[in-house]
Image: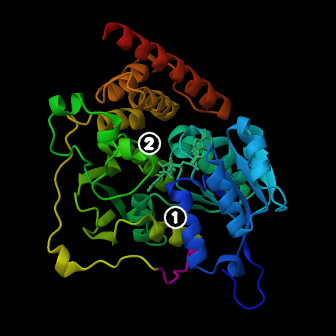
Amino acid sequence: MTTGNQKPRRLTIFGSTGSIGQNTLDVVNQLGGREAFEVVALTGNSNIGLLAEQAKACGAKLAVAADDSQYATLKEALAGTGIEAGAGREALIEAGARESDWVMAAIVGTAGLEPTLAAAKRGADIALANKECLVSAGELFVKAVARGGGRLIPVDSEHSAIFQSLEDDQHHAVERIVLTASGGPFRTWTRDQMAGVTAEIARAHPNWSMGLKISIGSASMFNKALEMIEAKHLFDLRPDQIEVIIHPQSVIHSMVGYTDGSVLAQLGSPDMRTAISYALTYPDRAPLNVERLDFAKLARLDFEAPDEVRFPALRLARTALERGGVQGAVMNAAEEIAFHAFCAGRIGFLDMADVAERVMEDMTQFAPANSMDEVFAADTEARHRAGRIIAHKEMAA
Ligand code: NDP
């Protein structure tokens, strides 16, 4: 934001057409719009109509579609506006490298890693929604941000809550962090009941309105598994310091437990705009039009222990955390392939965790993650192996 004669803050929004991206543009408008911010670049994948509309509305300098077959459509949609059009992987990376002060990383999946790295390397502040950057590249990603000189500010509501509950200079006194999880739509279901669900059923989250991948990940608890690994790298924790608790109301967004027995938490309505706004204004806070918590109406907050038998993704995250190296990249890549196969009706809901576990067991020898090349190699190999396991499952069905 600007005060007086300050220049508008320059923003890049990766994944602007998605759930987080649209919420980010809403926050940008609420916090001053063009008066306060200059949008350098917006990116989407194939929703060209929305991307062009957003670019025109906020006066973006550049709009990029990841899907390179959409270049002509995007160029035509932006004709006469003066907004530059780009498409494809290289154009996305170039958008990341283009000078701006703050970058919202909200592409879904590992596709977000390279463009976000390009922005991190040139020293932009990274507002990180794309947890896959940390799950796959972990320490390498954190180091790239640090070397670039920008700040890494979490957007995931749980990690934003922890970030907000961490006291300055008290890292040594952090005993544990507690990630809350709503439990998703199948919190009380048996494995037999879950076996037959479709993507349409699995995507209906009880509290949050989100993109398809994270909604299904909330139902399978794979999203929480990714968040456990994300937390490790963001806050430099040991695996035994990371707890998960089911909290169906999604009011406490997560907590930090200290060595003196205190637990600090951040609470709020289930609305991502609060975390996005905090990432945009950090370390300040700005007035935001979101629903306020009404404690009298809430009356109670419930908690229950997670069930790692019904939701094996949590167990897989612990394994990945303990093994370290590229195991996060392997788990994430295998799950991404399994997620697409589930959405296409090729495998069942429970098969997603099975595919990820089998690929992880097959690839324990790929342990170190000394370079991005090693991470990408493990990611590619995990995708191939997941594809083969899925094909076998289909043949056997
Ligand atoms: P959506 O599916 O709603 O949006 C994804 C965005 O990425 C869209 O702009 C989409 O473009 C674009 N995209 C899709 N595929 C590609 C690709 N291959 N290359 C480049 N861009 C692509 O996702 P969400 O907004 O829900 O989530 C984004 C990220 O934020 C995820 O990592 C998620 O885990 C994380 N997150 C999301 C939360 C939420 O509340 N939604 C909460 C916390 C974290 P198009 O629209 O054209 O397909």
| 149 on left or right of 319 | right
Residue at 45% from the left image edge and 57% from the top image edge: 156
Residue kind at label 2, given as amino acid type: Lys
| Quarter in which the N terminus is drawn | bottom right
Q: Earlier in the sequence, mark 2 or mark 1?
A: 1
| Residue tagged 2 | 213
Dividing the picture into quadrants, the one containing residue 146 is bottom right
| 385 on left or right of 342 | right
| 257 on left or right of 191 | right
Dividing the picture into quadrants, the one containing residue 152 is bottom right
Q: Position of residue 39 (x, y in %)?
A: 72, 66
Q: Which mark is residue 23?
A: 1
Is 57 a magenta residue? no
Q: Nearer the viewer, residue 61 or 108?
A: 61
Count how many numbered circles sit on residues in the image.
2
- Coloring basis for residues: rainbow
Residue at the limit of the structure toward the bottom, as seen here = 4
The residue stretch that appears in magenta: 281-288
Q: Position of residue 21 (x, y in %)?
A: 56, 58
Asked if 165 appears above or below 369 in the picture, the reply is below
Q: Are marks 2 and 1 in contact (CB under 8 Å)?
A: no
Q: Main secondary structure of the magenta part?
A: loop
Residue kind at label 1, given as amino acid type: Asn
Respond yes or no on whether mark 1 lies under 8 Å from ligand 1: yes
Residue at 63% from the left image edge and 63% from the top image edge: 151
Asked if 175 appears above or below 309 in the picture, the reply is below
The span from disc 2 to disc 1 (Cα, nearest Å) is 17 Å
Residue 358 can be seen, yes or no: yes
Q: Nearer the viewer, residue 324 or 99?
A: 99
